Structures are given as structure tokens and as C-alpha cells.
Amino acid sequence: RERRATVCDAFDRLSRGVTRGMADHSAAISMADAIRIALEQALPLAPVEVPAAQSLAHVLAADVLATEPHPQFRASVKDGYAVRAADVPAAGAVLQVVGESRAGMREVLAVDPGQACYVTTGGPIPSGADSVVEVERTSAASGPAPGGTWIRVHRTLAPGQDIRPVGFDIPAGSAVLGAGELVGAPELGILATVGAQRVFVHPKPKLAIVSTGDEIVDAAEAGLLPPNCIRDAVRPMLLAAVAEERLAREVLDLGICADAAAPLRTAVERALAAEADVLITSGGVSAGDRDLLGAHVLGEYGEVLFSLVKMKPGKPLTLTVARRPGGARPLLIFSLPGNPVSSYATFQLVVAPALRKIGGAREPRRGAV
């Protein structure tokens, strides 16, 4: 938060003159209303089935059930000896060690009365044994018969002592992850544990981004700026913000668009043709005579739900729902101010939550500017 505040302060110092003397906010809606309207339009995408390994950073669309118990065998909690509790009615009982059971061993000898089996942590419990005595509570002993290995047990035991039964961690049929959960590294570990190969998730939205302005120059262009121009800070910043949180499955970078109706229309048409779910524009929605996007273009493609918010800087934030023929999913067009600090703030407050909700998030309003 401190780092982002510092960046925003730097942008604000560069653009403070723009934010002074703004028009009256009486025609603007509240930021709370803007967020509510945006989230109402941001409907989650239909679930898709993907390999579990590709589900990282996605929201689960269905519960994940364990098809098998974990562990699938009785396992030792400690390094020690698997024995029959009935063979140790009192401390000092002497038992013969007849084998060992280590984690990963495929075959383990059975334990008969008067016998013990050395077992490591996580090792399978031999049939016949019903408890484990930790190795430090035993000592070497001489048996009643010559030969072999014998131990003396220095404590009494109860059946089930230090044994994880079948399904102790995860019973078969139980839900290990629920619909609505965001898959991170720990969740991937759980999916691997239960052997989940494929899961249902909400896909991320497809996103298009364009900056507008005759004065804007691509920041990637080397050399001195042309007279009276500035570098495009907004588009690289928004592209990074989307990538940082993995908010989109695909991003179409539409570059920089001039302040003219025809190229602005072209940008919208390209987003529609690419079947983008969301288009983010910056600039062109204020009150100037060259701010053609908000004044002339957006209304041609659908309904402008709001075009002013009670926020400074950030007032010209605009949301348009561009309808597609045949009732297909509409394109949401978020038009942000060209001021970098305004653009970043409105993106984090309104656009990012909408992108999260399209991706299935049940609590999309997380994080802070």
C-alpha cells in the first residue's frame, strides 16, 4: 500500500493542474453506486473443465470431492515399533522384532502375538498390530530364546496408539475444496493429494485495452519526445496491474488511438470482433471538444450506464454496455480518465472487482489502492 501510494503521489504531482477546478459533481453518481452497477453487469463466465495443473489463480465452479481416503492405509505417526497392545499389559514387556515397515514399502510382514515390527513415520502398520510405541520408549533386550532381535517396551499402550487410521486426514467422498474458492499453491497441493486430474473453474475474462489521445506517445519508443507530447503511462500500468493479479485469460493490447471518431470506433469494433468480455479505454471521456469517446462514440454501441462519479480525481469514469447481436454476452466498456492517478484509482476501485467477478469471485471487492 505504501509503495502504491508513493506512485500515485508522483502521478498526482504531475497532473495536479488537471484535477483543479473540476466541474460540479451534482450530476455524478457516488462511487458506491458505480461499483454496484459495475458488479451487477459483471456476470461470471460459464464454468469450464480444465486440467488441475492449469487451475492456478482460478475460482472453482464446483466442489472437489475425494474419490479415495487419505491415507489409504493405516500409517505410523512416529518412528517406533508396531505391536499388539495386548502384548504390553505392563511396562517391561519383551517382544521379538520380526521385520520393518518403512514409508513406501509395498509388502509388510504380519505381526503375531509376542512380536513387534520396526516402523518409520508414515510407514504402513502391519496386519495384526494395533498400536505403535515410539523408539525412545524402548531398549534392546535379551529374549527368552537365543537369536533374533528383541526389545523391551517401557510403557503401556492403548489400541490405536500413534496410528493414523484409513481416511484420518481425508475421508473418501468428502469435499476437500468448495465451489467459490480461489486456487492457489496450497489448493494445488490438496488437488494433488486427492489425485484430482480435472476440475471445473470459471474462466478469466478476455480483455482489451486502448489508450486515447493525440498527445500520447508509446512509452516503448526510444528517443526524445515529439514537441508537446507525453509518454503513455496508463496502458503499461494497467497491463501490469492485470498481469500482476492474473485478472484476464488473454489481453488484447490495442495500442494508442487518436482523438477522432473513426479510430475510436475502430478500437471498439476490434474488441467486439475479438469477442472480448471487457474493453478498458483511457482518456477521451472528459468535457473537452476532442473528448469524442464519451460524447459521441460510446452511445452508438449500447447503453451508457454512468459517465460521472463523485470522485476527485476520477470523475469522468464511464461504463457502457455494448450489446452484441443474437443476445450474445455484451462487451463491458470501462472508460477511465487519462490522468494516470485517476486511471489507476478507478481501475482498482471499479474495474478490478468487475474482472474478478466475471472470473467467478464471490468476494470481488478485495485489495486497496
Image (cartoon, rainbow, N blue to C red):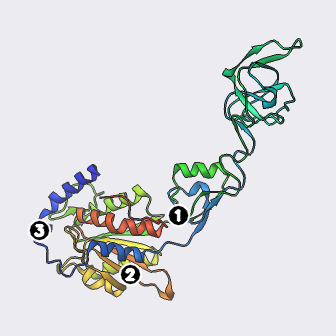
> Is residue 249 or residue 365 the one in the foreground?
365
164 left or right, relative to 211: right
- As helix, strand or loop, the secondary structure at mark 3 comes to loop
The kind of residue tagged 2 is Val
Residue 108 in sight? yes
The kind of residue tagged 3 is Arg
Residue 159 % position (x, y): 75, 36
Instruction: Mark 2 or mark 3: name the one nearer the start of the chain.
Output: 3
Separation of marks 2 and 3 at Cα, in angstroms:
30 Å
Which quadrant of the figure has residue 54? Answer: bottom right
Neighbours of disc 1 within 10 Å: few (<14), some (14-19), many (20+): some
Marks 3 and 1 close (CB-CB < 8 Å): no
Q: Quadrant of the C terminus?
A: bottom left
Which quadrant of the figure has residue 149? Answer: top right
The kind of residue tagged 1 is Gly
- As helix, strand or loop, the secondary structure at mark 1 comes to loop
Q: Name the residue that disc number 3 marks.
A: 20
Q: State the residue at coordinates (52%, 63%).
A: 180
Instruction: Mark 2 or mark 1: name the one nearer the start of the chain.
Output: 1
Instruction: Mark 3 or mark 1: name the one nearer the start of the chain.
Output: 3
